[in-house]
Amino acid sequence: MEWLGLHFFTPLPESGYLLLNCTHNPFLVLLAYLVACAASFGTLDMAERVGHVDNLTAKRHWRWIGAGCLAGGIWSTHFISMLALQAPITIHYEWFLTLASLAIALIASLFALQTLSHARMRFHQYLTAATCMGLGIALMHYVGMAAMRSEAQVYFSSGLFGLSVAIAIGASLAALLLSRYLRNGSGMFHQLLKYAASLVLGAGIISMHFTGMAAMQLLLPTGAVPALPIDNNPTQLGLSVAVITLLVIGSSISAALADKKLQHKERDLRRVNALLTELDQARASLQQVAHYDALTSLLNRRGFNQIFAENLAQKAQAEGMLAVIFLDIDHFKRINDSLGHDAGDELLTVLAGHIKSSIRSHNDVVARFGGDEFCILINIHHRDEARHMAQRIMQKMKEPIELAGRRMVMTTSIGISVFPEDGTTCEELLKTADLALYQSKDGGRNSLNFFSSNLKTRAFLELQLEEELRSALRNQKELVLHYQPILDLHKGKVTRLEALVRWQHPQHGLLAPERFIGIAENNGLIAELDNWVLRQACADLGWLTDQGHPELVMAVNCSALNLARDELADEIEYALRSSGIAASRLELEVTENALMGNISSTLILLRQIRALGVALSIDDFGTGYSSLSYLKRLPLNTLKIDRSFIQDIPKSTTDMEIVQAIIGMAHTLHLQVITEGVETQQQLELLIKHGCDYVQGYLLSAAVPASEISAVITALDQRNPPGLAGSKDTTSAKGSSTGSSVVRPIR
């Protein structure tokens, strides 16, 4: 087969021809290999650039530059290798076919770079692309050899010809796989690996060429006189081509390196910009967290105070008015306790929406201060504007809300302060609004109140009392105990005392517990106060024992807040041990509501106290809420009827019937009954008639200091005969009037 003057798969003629032997210039062969290695390195570098560039136009440009490096390198390798051929005849080259071979190399190289542009390819796809690329390189080689013109005819050995094509395909496959592998990497090892791959690929390219040259056989017709070769200095030409090619490849590699550094800088710049953007977002998020409530998206206290200060400064300059509306959701804790905190959060979100829908415009500021407290700042011209807004909010709050399968209605307590009447600073206005809020809560809730000067006076006085109470607890010189006797109606003698705390204030005189117990409870002082009363009462009971009263029982009141403390049992045990009195001589009085507040934990604590041997009494019975099913489970000894059921007896038959029912119920539960607040003989006689066990009140004696209680006990025991209840029943049955002098009060 003859193609472009070349004979493929054609046997050599048997006679009439002379076979020419050819050699190669070793310097040009080495130079060709150097160019092939440089072309391989440039191709790997360009493929890496194509893979890393994001811009499509830049990717296309680098694809063309890479194709030019590969095509120029392969073609220069082929051309220099052809110049290295040394034959005993004159050989020259046709420029058209030579340029055609360069075009074929460029097409094959573009195909290779296009293949490397794909992100992922399977092996069979690489094999197909390598076959096409190898055939293109082989075609370039043999078209270049067809450009060779001489008197000899060119024949090719079939085996070596096929081997050259296989080498071209193998080298192409190796180039594609290595380029894909080396695309993502960095560092010295990666660079050394790229150099080694370039040497291997260069060897493949040069091997393909010289395998094709080895397959070539030059035949000269018999009798033909070969023209001597002309010395046109092929070494200089090959060196010039190599230098030009290497300069082009080197320039391309330098450009790629510069572009790589520029791209890294651009990426670093984008990374810096991205970090700056993230910082801005983080700053905005922190601003959101710092100034807004996460649950309701309303302003929090910090954000509110910032806007409040700005508006306050503006109004101070313009001599305008502002109103601060402080809201507290009534009995919100019950929602959390009964339905859970998730339901409470859902309710707060709904209520926040109600509040926002009640304000007038975006100029009004709404904030959540935490828990169920909300605050509104509005611009006003007169006080009624604040009142009308507060009323709108209260009305909006009363709309039914579906929550956790229940339909409920919430109410709110509101306090209002006005700038500049009630304060000129943020702190003063918030404080005065808070005082007005507490007035609304103390007045029964679901109401609104404006701040007034008497509230400030009262708040100042309570603050002062709080500080002085702390001091009194520290020095323990101003607090005193008074004792009220409790008469046993069956024995006709005083068997119990109730310890009642008093405060001998330096300026205000003797203060009753109603004046300072609430302050102690609201400021975390009640535990310390109760513990002092307990220890002092036990100590005084020990002293009374030495004075001749060994059977007295001491009743000590316990606050509802103190009843929730696990340390209470240990404190009682310590007080008993310190005073040396028996536990059976101490009785702890707790209110009805305190017992029922948290029945499960209360029951555990009461059983611990009963295990010590201390008696338990339920105080103020009938004024709170209790369940008989729970009441029978409590380890109680005594039930004390509140004075409110006694004060209208005997005028109120209803109260008498209630007292009679309570006594009967208590005896059914095996509880003793004490009735407090007994002030008249008629009240006493009716209580004796209905089986009451103990009485206390002004009919017997008011509460007196410890120094006087012994004389009071002695006087009462001497004036009241034993078996008082039994004797009264007898005299009543006979219609005697002697019962009127059975109990004589000690004034």
Image: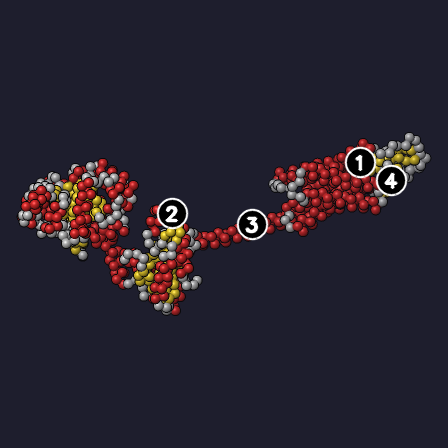
Query: Which residue occupies 38% across, 59% down?
Result: 396
CA gap between label 1 and label 3 equals 52 Å
Can residue 239 be seen here? The reply is: no
Q: Disc 4 or 1, which lies upstream in sequence?
A: 4
Query: Which residue occupies 37% across, 47% down?
Result: 339
Please state the horizontal and vertical placement of residue 365, each as a whole percent of the image. 40, 60
CA gap between label 4 and label 1 equals 16 Å
Q: Disc 2 or 4, which lies upstream in sequence?
A: 4
Please state the horizontal and vertical placement of residue 95, each as a whole percent of the image. 83, 46
User: Badge 3 is on which residue?
Assistant: 271
CA gap between label 2 and label 4 equals 95 Å
Q: Are there few (<14), some (14-19), or many (20+) residues within 10 Å of tag 4?
A: some
Between tags 2 and 4, which lies in front? 2
Kind of residue sitting beneath label 2: His
- Nearest the eye: 341 or 669: 669
User: Badge 2 is on which residue?
Assistant: 341
CA gap between label 3 and label 4 equals 61 Å
Query: Which residue occupies 11% across, 48% down?
Result: 685
Colour setup of the view: secondary structure
Q: Disc 1 or 3, which lies upstream in sequence?
A: 1
State the image quarter where residue 438 is shown.
bottom left
- Residues at badges 4 and 1 in contact (C-beta under 8 Å)? no
Kind of residue sitting beneath label 4: Gly
Please state the horizontal and vertical placement of residue 61, each as a whole percent of the image. 69, 50
Q: Disc 3 or 4, which lies upstream in sequence?
A: 4
| Disc 4, SS | loop
CA gap between label 3 and label 2 equals 43 Å
User: Badge 4 is on which residue?
Assistant: 5
Q: Disc 3 or 2, which lies upstream in sequence?
A: 3
Q: Is residue 558 above or below residue 447?
A: above
